[in-house]
Amino acid sequence: MTTYWPWWTVAPALAALTVGHWILVRRPLGVSGVLARFSRVREELAFDRGTAVMQAGSPALEAAMAAAAAEFLGGPLPDSLAAEAPAETGSAPQAAPAGRECAPTPPLSAHLTFLVAVAAGGFLAALSRGTFGAGTGDAFARLIGSGPVALAALAGGGALVGFGTALCGGCSAGHGLTGCGRLMPGSLLSTGVFFAAAAAVSLLLGGLAS
Amino acid sequence: MSCSHMATCPLFAKFKMKASLRIWQDFFCQGQFETCARFKLAKAGTRVPPNLLPNGKTLDLAVLG
Amino acid sequence: MKNLDTHARMAALGLGLGFVVSAAGLADWGEIHRMFTLGLQGGPRDFRLILAFGGAVALAVAGFLLLARRDALPPKPIRPGTIPGAVLFGAGWAVAGACPAAALVQIGEGKSAAFVTLGGMLAGAWLHDRMRKRFHWARHSCID
């Protein structure tokens, strides 16, 4: 029987990762959205290219934006605004909230690094417990089965997870930890519902097996 | 009243940084944000292309990149 | 250089998440099943993971209030896909024994069957995107 961490170690560790992720990269912690990007790589790469060009802020970009502004202004920019001096933060009456803002979408390569690192973290942990290579365990074998049935269950369950997380906009980390951590209504509801659904199915599986 | 998406819109961060771009911010983000093409797409639940400007114009990335 | 910094931070955060998920037993099918059956079916009552999750949320709420009160995280409103999506996700999690992070961790732990799980997740995400575009569903991602 593998010894896992007690709850009072897991809880602060997960909370630290959730808040720490936001502070370190100014992105909400979440896995399903990141993973989903890799189901449509071409589209995501195109999006990344667009983001990179827009974020780079070349003189050509600003000229193009100034030209576009002239279109809706009905004339060229006033000289006072056309000057190259960067705006000081706080000099304009901004209604924008103080505090950190969300960073633009990281490139696919950075997200790949993240996903691989998650697997690597699992590898290190398993190594430290000496359980690398252990199978899915007795409970799974008892309640689902083995061989092709087991693989079908994993594939089907996985598909439900992939579809469902995309449909509700988050997973146990994105909704459960980050969203609930910020008391977001969509996350609170999602988390309650997915826990309830998982409990119902788990109890059903247990009931069927006995 | 200003746009509720300001904090997550990658363009808004860009507008803040340069005086010459703040006209966009004044006109849309802190002005007529409901007319912003990016706001409208986001509200509809559609992905917002990075090169879409608030006035609906799409910048040609091939020229800029 | 800036990109290297991003990669380094993502790597560190990913390693941390993977390690904790594994060490907590959140990638163990039996532990997940125990969590979701709430101690109602045979075996000893064990609320370890429920307490872990609840405690993590409580601490995250506190942490965000203390360190990021005025920060603007992307909002997560209730939308048409919220309930149906959550139902499907929960059901899938109970059967596959893995949420997306856990599937990756399982691969790292040497549970090769998890490649099937991960494949299923990618297929499910792909299918959702196709249907979303076909039927003009709203997009819920906060990826961008």
Image (tube, helix red, strand yellow):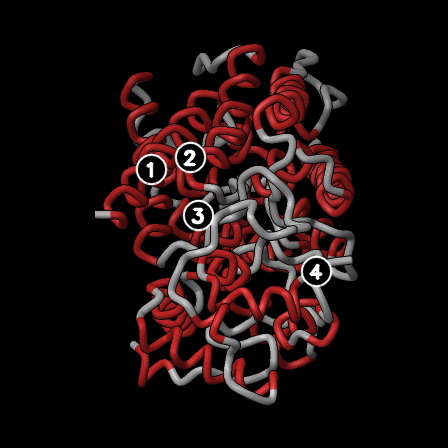
Residue kind at label 4, given as amino acid type? Cys
Gap between marks 4 and 1, in whole Å?
30 Å
Q: In this view, does A13 lie to the left or right of A161?
A: left
Assess disc 2: are there few (<14), some (14-19) or many (≥20) residues with their C-alpha within 10 Å of its C-alpha: few
In the picture shown, does residue A158 fall above or below B14? above
* Disc 1 and disc 2 in contact, CB within 8 angstroms: yes
Q: Residue A147 carries which label?
A: 3
Helix, strand or loop at label 2? It is helix
Residue corresponding to mark 1: C9
Residue ID for mark 4: B3
Parent chain of label 1: C
Mark-to-mark CA distance, 2 and 3? 43 Å
Relative horizontal placement of residue B62, taking residue C74 as reference (left or right): left
The CA distance from mark 3 to mark 4 is: 54 Å
Q: Is residue C41 left or right of residue C67?
A: right
Q: Are the residues flagged by discs 4 and 1 from a single subunit?
A: no
- Residue at image position (66%, 69%) is B28
Of labels 3 and 4, the one closer to you = 4
- Which of the chains bears the disc numbered 2? A
Query: In the image as oriented, which residue stretches furthest toward the left?
Result: C1
Tell us which disc is closer to us: 2 or 3. Answer: 2
Crowd tier of the residue under label 4, counting other residues whose Cα lies within 10 Å: few below 14, some 14–19, many 20 or above: some
Q: Is residue A3 visible?
A: yes
Would you name the residue on which mark 2 appears? Answer: A24
Q: Residue at x 70, y 56 (%)?
A: B4
Expressed as whole percent of the image width and height from the top left, the position of residue A99 reads 57, 37
Q: Nearer the viewer, residue C86 or C75?
A: C75
Name the secondary structure under disc 4: loop
Observer-side mark, 3 or 1, equals 1
